[in-house]
Image (cartoon, coloured by chain):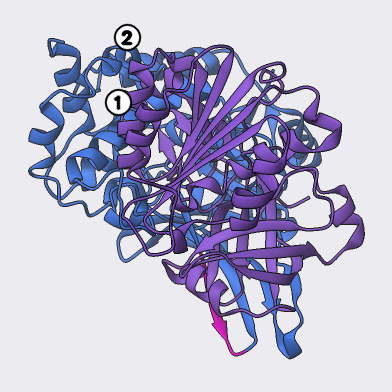
Amino acid sequence: MNPLLPKPATIVDIIRETGDVKTFRVVLDDPEEMAAWTHKPGQTAMLSVFGVGEAMFCLASSPTCRDWLEFSIRRAGKVTSALHELEPEAKIGVRGPYGNHFPYENMQGKNLLVIGGGIGLAPLRPLVNFMLAPENRQHYGNIEVIYGARSYGDLCYKEEVFRVWPQAPGVSVFTTIDAPEEGWSGHVGFVPAYVEELKPSPENKFVVICGPPVMIRFTLKALGELGFEEKQIYTTLEMRMKCGIGKCGRCNVGARFVCRDGPVFNLAELKELPPEY
Amino acid sequence: MDSKLLKKEKLLPLLDELRKEFLLVAPVEEDALLFYRPVESVAEIKLGSGRSVVPPKEWFFPQAESLYRYSTEGGGLVLEETLAATPAVLFGIHPCDLRSFAVLDAVFLQEPVDRYYTLRREKTVIIGISCTAVCPECFCSAYGISPVEGTGADVHLSEVGAVYMVEVLTPKGKELVARYQEFFEDQVAGVAEAKEARKETLSGQFTVRVTVDGLPAKLGSLFDHPYWEELSRRCLGCGICTYVCPTCHCFDITDVCRGFEGKRFRCWDACLFRDYTLHTSGHNPRHALYQRLRNRFFHKLKYNHDRYAIEGCVGCGRCVALCPVNIDIREVIATVRGLGE
């Protein structure tokens, strides 16, 4: 087994989420490998566009989805732009899954607060859908989702955010956009302010948060004031990566490699690390 | 451990025999600089050589290597691994570089193992050689390395008068010595003692005494110290220290392609380069040179120790010798140990 060798895969569907984000549904070409694929919420995988390069993305699909893997990708650099050029049926490479995961085992019997900004919902979505899967739902408490973006058009996963999740028992979804917009009757304002307003209780709860650094920073402040402890709050880090298996060096934060020891850390763990992320 | 003797005049004939069976990689001089290269003839070998410019790690972890080929012809995708290793003998490795292999092993042999490195490592027999002199930049003793010890080699040679004392250190080494037994003689009295005496002489020759006790813990409290910014003012960020470092293992992975055919390869990279950690978003967690220089010293002197329980520096002195602005890791260690918190 050569961990650097990708598995050939095919893009079977492309869903346009926002102006610059697409979700790619990918199936490994070897049916046995596809059947054997397992990942945990929060893990990542390396995607290859041959002739362009490789980049690491979070898995946006739940481990309980066995038909395909999903990756939600914002057009930003070389590999992501090349991916955005592709059409269904295109061949790519996949290797992974990599890294640790959200502690869904320890989250059993607890409530979950999900806080996402823009495409930052992508790594959190597998956890929500994993918990909502019929075989798992009984093990978890209530789920609150606070999700914001610059505009309505920048909210990802609209079908789930506005229809599927709010209809699921024990799930509340609170959406917000940065500025008023015609046709938007929901909340307007930044995520941290919305969190302050909603005042979620820290009782028997885990928090998972991902989004722009500035959103995270101010939201953490708000959560601290609401009485949340560092060990209750999990986030997922992004770093430039090449190998994904702890050899190529660049994703280190202190002595930890984000590709192997991360990407998921709780705040208490992050405080132990040098602030280089 | 077995000990044998090899008469000096028999070394080249032995290597010549080895060359017929193995790919022989040995120190050679190119433009007055020393490298480890596969040799066609033993006459190319530079015997009695000191430290190479580029460390012998490049035999296991080449500066650039192809990982696999791909073809996307007709909208399909065919991947073909380019994994190859020839049985080889790596000759003339000094104790500091022998230790460096253990440091690299901790990275590349850890699960999931790096197949490229592992395959070459498995198929290579290492013949170490004791130092006969200490370079002005050497400080291997700080890391408990002795210039006459062969830990990490399969077979280790120490020059003692007209002979080499031969230490057979691993099963691989034992097999090699047994296979070429006609070249070796039994150990005689006095040789081991002479080797020990050489150790004494050499350890008196280190120009700078370096102590690294407690360094990983001490550094932990100095992350925010202004020293790193001061030190970085003369750093050019050229990365030569990483390219000549026997324990640096960072690499980049990239594509070269023409039409539908291409290959993915990897090549050495350096934490001192700005785009090493540059995110697609434009964010760079180590945007300033001082952060990158600090990361390099922390990696060598702390992180490697914390992560793998083996020191990340072997005291070879290459970075000291080649830094264009005289940043000297020995000086950094001494300064850091003296800094208040």
Q: Residue at x 19, y 24 (%)?
A: B224
Q: Which mark is residue B139?
A: 1
Say which quadrant the N terminus of chain B sits in.
Answer: top right
Residue B53 seen in this snapshot: no
Q: Residue at x 56, y 21 (%)?
A: A206
The chain coloured blue is B
Residue B256 vertical placement versus A55 (above, below): below
Outermost residue toward the right in this view:
A32
Residue range (magenta): B254-259
Percent x, y of residue B60: 58, 49
- For numbered disc 1, what is the local secondary structure? loop
- B119 vs B206, left or right, is right
Chain A image colour: purple
- Estimate the spatial distance between the alpha carbons at disc 1 and disc 2, rounded to whole Å: 17 Å
* Chain of residue at mark 1: B
Percent x, y of residue B339: 13, 14
- Quadrant in the rendering for residue B262: bottom right
Residue at label 2?
B214
Label 2 Cα crowd, 10 Å radius (few <14 / some 14-19 / many 20+):
few
A226, B305: nearer the viewer = A226
Which of the two marks, 1 or 2, is nearer to us in this view?
2
Q: Residue at x 75, y 79 (%)?
A: A89
User: Mark 1 or mark 2, which has the lower sequence index?
Assistant: 1
